[in-house]
Amino acid sequence: MDMQMKRGLLDICVLAAIKNEDSYGYKIIKDVKPYLSISESTLYPILRRLEEAGCLTVRSEEYNGRLRKYYSITSAGQTRIKDFAEEWKEITAVYEYVTREEKES
């Protein structure tokens, strides 16, 4: 898969993991795991990139005597998910066109 496309898909998956409730790194990995494999070394740069893009905010909160970072989606992050859903319709249409002969066979 094209690296840019994969990067974009990972970003959307991370945003989708926090769209309904704030979450933290380990939980995001656990929530995404049924759909794709993502490691901590992949996740944290994505979270930083999304924060810099204004798609999420981060806050630290104490949990069991340690600080844990919680991530919240912003309106820009919600918009990014909506835009992705619209773009995916176009991608699906292209896929249907490209594979139409295989389906007809």
Image (cartoon, rainbow, N blue to C red):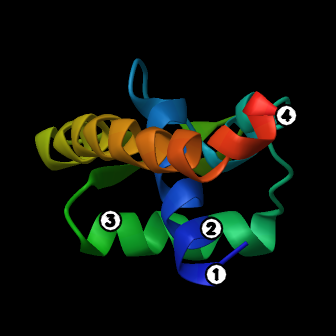
- Describe the element under mark 2 as helix, strand or loop: helix
Residue under numbered circle 1: 3
Q: Can you identify the residue that label 3 sits on? A: 51
- Whole-angstrom CA distance, mark 4 to mark 1, is 31 Å
Mark 3, secondary structure of its residue: helix
Which residue is farthest front? 105
The residues tagged by marks 2 and 4 sit, at their Cα atoms, a distance apart of: 30 Å
Q: Quarter of the image holding residue 54?
A: bottom left
Q: Which mark is residue 26?
A: none
Earlier-in-chain disc, 2 versus 3: 2
| Chain-order first, disc 3 or disc 1 | 1
Instruction: Please report the residue visible at 56 percent of the width from the left and 39 percent of the height from the top.
Output: 96
Name the quadrant of the C terminus: top right
Residue 6 has which mark? 2
Q: Quadrant of residue 26?
A: top right
Relative depth, front residue between 39 and 12: 12
* Residue hosting label 4: 105
Instruction: State the image coordinates of residue 82 (x, y, percent, origin top left).
Output: 24, 35
Q: Position of residue 21 (x, y in %)?
A: 43, 21
Q: Is residue 27 above or below residue 12?
A: above
